[in-house]
């Protein structure tokens, strides 16, 4: 996983071209103006989900990972805690291929607090629990770029 801020993407020139396209798209478009839902950039190879929700206690959230896509979580407004652990440290449930969703169970290894402009890149070995409150519940608006790997 890689944690950074959209204003410092020059430090991440080593990342694959499709991840760089996510950063460029975020800089060139007002992502808050997009409606909730899925938005294609390059078909199924590169798209993003625009979402918003209230953060909550970790007991109300779930662990997940993906096999076909890496996630680039980018916070547009609000503050969100994302708990992380490697999939090898978590118990895997049954993979749902059509949704590229691997449910996981276990404990966090670390937590990251993301604020507007912060991003978190999650690779297939990075289990993550999103939507956790950082202190108190808060409305978070974000995009999750989905990059085919």
Image (spheres, rainbow, N blue to C red):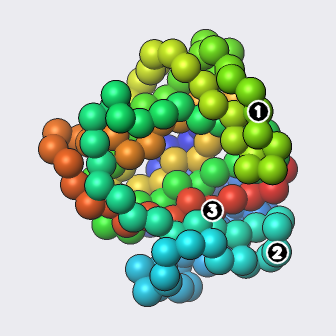
The spot of residue 85 in percent (x, y) is 54, 23
Q: Which mark lies nearer to you, 1 or 3?
A: 1
Mark 1 and mark 3 residues within 8 Å of each other at the beta carbon: no
Please tell me which residue lies in front, 7 or 123: 123
Q: Quadrant of residue 77?
A: bottom left
| Placement of 92 over or under 103, stated as above or below | above
In space, the residues marked 2 and 1 are separated at their CA atoms by 23 Å
| Placement of 100 over or under 107, stated as above or below | below
Residue 6 visible (yes or no): no
The spot of residue 130 in percent (x, y) is 44, 43
Q: Residue at x 38, y 46 (%)?
A: 131
Q: Secondary structure at mark 3?
A: strand
In space, the residues marked 1 and 3 are separated at their CA atoms by 20 Å
Residue 37 visible (yes or no): yes
Comes first in the chain, label 1 or label 3: 1
Q: Secondary structure at mark 1?
A: loop
Q: Is residue 123 left or right of residue 49?
A: right
Q: Is residue 37 left or right of residue 132?
A: right
- Checking the image for residue 145, the label placed there is 3
Residue pointed to by mark 2:
43
Residue pointed to by mark 1:
95
Q: Quadrant of residue 16?
A: bottom right
Q: Secondary structure at mark 2?
A: loop
In space, the residues marked 3 and 2 are separated at their CA atoms by 12 Å
């Amino acid at each position: 996983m890689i944690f950074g801020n959209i204003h410092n993407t020059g430090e991440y020139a080593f990342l694959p071209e499709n991840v760089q396209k996510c950063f460029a798209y975020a800089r060139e478009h007002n992502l808050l103006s997009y409606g909730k839902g899925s938005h294609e950039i390059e078909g199924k190879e590169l798209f993003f989900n625009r979402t918003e929700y209230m953060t909550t206690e970790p007991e109300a959230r779930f662990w997940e990972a993906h096999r076909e896509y890496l996630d680039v979580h980018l916070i547009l407004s609000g503050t969100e805690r994302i708990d992380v652990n490697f999939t090898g440290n978590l118990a895997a449930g049954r993979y749902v291929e059509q949704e590229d969703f691997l449910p996981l169970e276990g404990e966090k290894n670390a937590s990251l607090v993301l604020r507007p402009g912060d991003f978190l890149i999650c690779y297939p070995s990075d289990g993550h629990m999103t939507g956790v409150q950082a202190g108190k519940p808060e409305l978070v608006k974000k995009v999750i770029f989905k990059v085919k790997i």
